[in-house]
Image: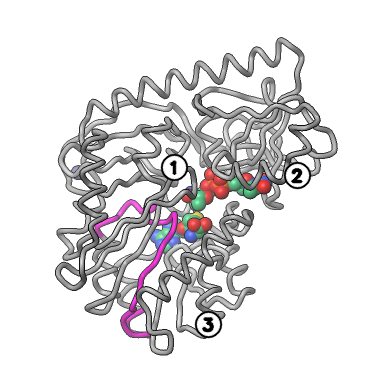
Amino acid sequence: MKCRVCQHEISPFMTFGRMPIANGFLTADKFDGEYFFELKPAFCDRCFTFQIEDQPEPELMFHDQYAFFSRTSAFMQRHFQAYGNWVRETFLDDSESFVVELGSNDGIMLEHFAGHGISHLGVEPSANVAEEARRHGVNTMVEFFGPQIAQHIVAEYGQADALMAANVMCHIPDINGIAQGASTLLKPRGVFIFEDPYLGAMIDKTTYDQIYDEHVFIFSALSVSNIFAPHGFELIDLLPQETHGGSMRYVLARTGQRQVSANVARIIAEEKSAGLDQSGTYDRFRADCEASKTRLVNLLRAEKEAHRRVVGYGATSKSTTILNYCQIGPDLIEFISDTTPIKQGKYSPGMHIPVKPYEAFTENYPDTALLFAWNHKTEIMEKESRFASSGGKWITHIGTE
Ligand code: JHZ
Ligand code: SAH
Ligand code: ZN
């Protein structure tokens, strides 16, 4: 295969096997035609970008029945309010500014710009979540962002002061097209700010469930710097985030236009000492994934032998990788509870575990809950203190938690 960023010849370092669409929760009548592809991660030792070889077509993942709504976490609502405020205070002159967000989903961040009367536009291809954003007063265009859309936006609104994204950039395979679109869209001193799950955190904790169809890339500062340099952008700041189990906020500007924070050189040096630029790191990661799989399967088999009921908590996209890689089905997990209406009453992709409303969990506590939404642990532990105090046990696929 060719690296999606620099065209260097690379090959996958492992396979997670046959995978369905991670957010493709389905009814039983759809089992027969379910789509599968092989999930194979690869690392490019020239531009240092971690990527997957095959990704399903975007329209198979993002459409008018998209299952992920950003507002399902109260913690994330606060996070996006703070993210929005920080962008406004750091980079904008409120009265004049125009901002664009890619993958604005249900408007969780842009509503904080709309609320301040700031000219804004969300570019969001999934029509159902875009509709929810509009209900919150967020101006939204139902499109996949790319170089052409950038031109249309400039023609209609003029250039932007800030282009923002969260958990979106790592979803878009034509990353060079996005960088080109950003260059078209931004004013000379405009900033491009995005955050995504961080490669350093994933390698450190073996949270391999960050790898699934939507996440075609898992970025590091090293890779982001190499991706954007040919397009005339440089990193001017890096801000680690605790969201999604460890994320990084990347701040880019046109080269030479803005002062570069000392964080940039520091974090890049840390990445080199952690070996994020070395192929051997990913061979070790593969071994860690295999060990994690063995541990989780053994744990669940032991629960079953002890006649203990196990349910999943949070029908996350991430859980699709865990369940299909470890081949865990309804024989080991009775159901998965989730607060998202569109997922309820359906089955999990690939392994077909029933997804039930939250009340199915609270009304009849299991003996053990497998926390698939481990990235929301703080929020969930606060809410579920009664489960633990009544003897319930939490487990995750992460060896150290
Ligand atoms: P959560 C999605 O990943 C997909 P997922 C995507 N690719 C991405 O990058 C991130 O989001 C941003 C439920 N829940 O956030 C709601 C409860 O039931 O880990 C969600 O279905 N009770 C765009 O899907 C799921 O869990 C709760 O108390 O891995 C959480 O999904 C809470 C807090 C959540 O993202
Ligand atoms: N920013 C939100 C939503 C992340 S979900 C959050 O962090 O919670 C990822 C979103 O990106 C989805 O809503 C999906 O429809 C959207 N998306 C996928 N490809 C895109 C593209 N090419 N341009 C803009 N948005 C895209
Ligand atoms: Zn490359």
Q: Is residue 159 magenta?
A: yes
Looking at the rendered structure, the secondary structure element under dot 2 is: helix
Q: Closest to the observer: 241 or 397? A: 241
Ligand 3 found in image quarter: top left
Query: Which label number is shown at residue 2?
Result: none
Q: CA distance from mark 1 to mark 3?
A: 36 Å
Q: Closest to the observer: 58 or 120? A: 120
Is 398 drawn above or below residue 159 in the view shown?
A: above
Res. 84 visible in picture = yes
Q: Position of residue 170 (x, y in %)?
A: 37, 51
Disc 3: CA contacts within 10 A as few (<14), some (14-19) or many (>=20)? few
Q: Name the residue carrying label 3.
A: 116
Do the residues under discs 1 and 2 have CB atoms within 8 angstroms? no
Q: Amino acid at mark 2?
A: Tyr
Disc 2: CA contacts within 10 A as few (<14), some (14-19) or many (>=20)? some
Q: Is mark 2 within 8 Å of ligand 1?
A: yes
Point out the image quarter for the N terminus: top left
Is 129 drawn above or below residue 272 in the view shown?
A: below
Q: Amino acid at mark 3?
A: His
Is 65 drawn above or below residue 34 in the view shown?
A: below
Q: Nearer the N terminus, badge 3 or badge 2? A: 3
Q: Is residue 127 rendered to the left or right of residue 119?
A: right
Q: Nearer the N terminus, badge 1 or badge 3? A: 3
Q: CA distance from mark 3 to mark 2?
A: 34 Å
Numbered range of the magenta stretch:
153-176
Res. 324 visible in picture = no
Q: Name the residue carrying label 1.
A: 213
Do the residues under discs 1 and 3 have CB atoms within 8 angstroms? no
User: At x 63% / y 41%, what residue is drawn?
Assistant: 315
**Extreme-bottom residue of the structure:** 95
Q: Is mark 1 within 8 Å of ligand 1?
A: no
